[in-house]
Image: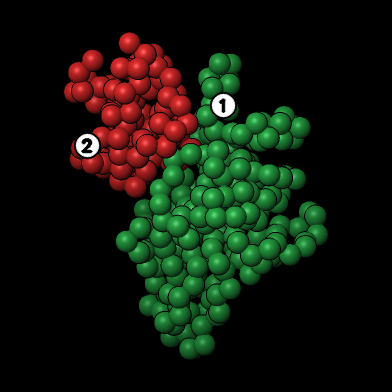
Chain colours: A red, B green
Amino acid sequence: MEREEVKNKLEEIIKQYVTDMEAFGNISETTDLLQDLKINSAHLIDIVLDVEEAFDIEIDDESVEKMITVKDSVDTILACVKATA
Amino acid sequence: MSLGNDVISIAHLIERTGDRKQRYYEKTYTENEIRLIETLNMKYVEGFFWALKESAYKAYFRINPKQIVSPKKFEVLAFDGVKATVKTPVGIMDSVVEANENYIHGVTFQSPLPPFQKGNSPLAKGVGGVESIVFQFGKNFHQEVKTIIAKKLHCNIEEVEIIKDKNNVPTLKVENQHYLLSLSHDYNWGAYAYQNVNKCTKKQA
């Protein structure tokens, strides 16, 4: 799976939980999900669950901890996709 | 000393069922917490636990500003529906929750929680020197917080400042004194908590 494809799919998932659409308009690989997009922390686990379903992967607790920025999250998803292939 | 708070709008709580609920529990709670949740049998229990964990996270982050996306590292050890103890990477903290049909608000602080009468709202009573307010805000959350605090402390609004450090951690500055302040908002519900703040000495204009 291509990096760009993962990033686009991830952004679609994130979008459902963002209330600040202006911040979402400026999303990039360095965007911090909590600090920059102001996603309610209670929804972070929902993003992880959506990602697992969308990519048919399982993300363990250690990997969830790394999902701080968009880049971190894409890297984590790619690593999980590769591990389950 | 540290302090954190978290408000959750009940109208926007996500109801998870079936497999999704199971997976959410596995990623969010420790085995002990799941046992505790089952014994509590409370409505909106997930919202209560999240408010406890997130307020504890904020209290932790003030001490050690290293972002952790790991809810299990903030473990609710005990919860009686109002007060709780939460284990964090920097030690055990005390928490208090207040809730109504609109919101759930958790406040966590480091100092030991003094005894209070069951049934009283410990936050309204200022337990541990902590005071907090939950309110519906309009367009400018910070400005509205400042206005409420100024009124409460009998200050001119110019004497009240909310300062955020490079990690986005807020403090309250009143008459050149700095105090612990925690802020939270969820949709149109906002909340703040501060600890041991003195009222203004200067006469209001």
Q: Is residue B201 above or below residue B25?
A: below
Q: Chain of mark 1?
A: B
Q: Identity of the amino acid at label 1?
A: Glu
Q: Depth check: B77 or B190 in front?
A: B77
Q: Mark 2 = which residue?
A: A29
Q: Quadrant of residue B90?
A: bottom right
* In-image side of B154 versus B164 (left or right): right
* In-image side of A18 versus B90 (left or right): left
- Residue most toward the front? A83
Specify the label residue B35 is tagged with: none
* In-image side of B171 versus A37 (left or right): right
Q: Quadrant of the N terminus of chain B?
A: bottom right
Q: Identity of the amino acid at label 2?
A: Glu
For the residues beneath circles 1 and 2, the answer to whether they share a chain is no
Q: Is residue A14 above or below residue B54?
A: above
Q: Quadrant of residue B127?
A: bottom right
Q: Depth check: B18 or B166 in front?
A: B166
Q: Residue B160, how many percent across, how many down?
A: 42, 74
Q: Residue at x 38, y 77 (%)?
A: B158
Q: Quadrant of residue A28?
A: top left
Q: Residue at x 71, y 35 (%)?
A: B36
Label 1 secondary element: helix
Q: Residue A9, how many percent across, how many down?
A: 28, 21
The answer to whether one can see residue A50 in this image is no
